[in-house]
Amino acid sequence: MRGLFEEHLNVVAKVLDLRLQRQNVVMANIANISTPNYKARSLAFEDELQDAMNQDGKGQMARTDPRHLPTTFDVDGFQGKGATEFKPRMIYGNDSVDLDKEMSTMAKNTLMYNALSDIEAKDFAGLQTVIQEGGK
């Protein structure tokens, strides 16, 4: 039973960790909004995650032959990629943090984190039901 869910849970845990890291980066950007010459940072990992999982970006496994099995995903070797952007604000011109952009990034990231954690909670609730019903 251990091998049935272990890989799936490792991937979900890694994605949740990366979303938490992104939230921290966005909060740091917002905290430094009035810091002169501060350069906004971002954490991008979605494209690299799809590449690491051999997906074509549409949620489908990319294989050269239908008889091939997909490769396994190594959670330990995967990291998000930090990026630094410098785009001066047009309103004040003294910093590079766009509050509207950061707030929308934070809202989207929060929604994605909550959705993934809700899906996992339902998976565990379903598993618990199967275990409880199987004992009768």
Image (cartoon, rainbow, N blue to C red):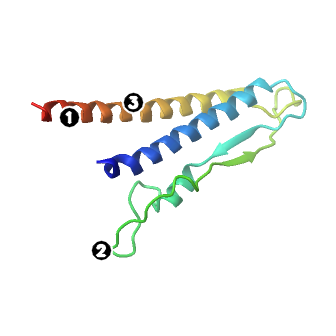
Q: Disc 1 on helix, strand or loop?
A: helix
Q: Write down the quadrant of residue 126 in the picture.
A: top left
Name the amino acid type tagged 2.
Answer: Arg
Place of residue 6 in the rendered image (x, y in percent of width and height, measured from the top left): 39, 48
* Tag shown at residue 118: 3
Q: Is residue 59 left or right of residue 50?
A: left
In the picture of the structure, the residue carrying the numbered disc 2 is 67
Above or below for 46 versus 125: below
Q: Badge 1: few (under 14), some or many (20 or more) residues near its Cα, within 10 Å?
A: few
Place of residue 136 in the rendered image (x, y in percent of width and height, measured from the top left): 9, 30
| Identity of the residue drawn at 81% across and 42% down | 86
| Identity of the residue drawn at 54% across and 32% down | 108
Which comes before the other along the chain, label 2 or label 3? 2
Q: Is residue 60 left or right of residue 86?
A: left
User: In 3D space, how far apart are the residues under numbered discs 2 and 3 (Cα atoms)?
Assistant: 34 Å
Residue 25 in view? yes
Name the amino acid type tagged 1.
Answer: Ile
Q: Write down the quadrant of residue 20 in the picture.
A: top right
Q: Is residue 33 left or right of residue 47?
A: right
Q: Badge 3: few (under 14), some or many (20 or more) residues near its Cα, within 10 Å?
A: few
User: In 3D space, how far apart are the residues under numbered discs 3 and 1 (Cα atoms)?
Assistant: 20 Å
The reply to whether dot 3 and dot 1 touch (C-beta < 8 Å) is: no
User: In 3D space, how far apart are the residues under numbered discs 1 and 2 (Cα atoms)?
Assistant: 34 Å
Q: Disc 2 on helix, strand or loop?
A: loop
Place of residue 25 in the rendered image (x, y in percent of width and height, measured from the top left): 69, 34
Which comes before the other along the chain, label 1 or label 2? 2
Above or below for 20 versus 44: above
Q: Disc 3 on helix, strand or loop?
A: helix
Which comes before the other along the chain, label 3 or label 1? 3
* Tag shown at residue 80: none
In the picture of the structure, the residue carrying the numbered disc 1 is 131
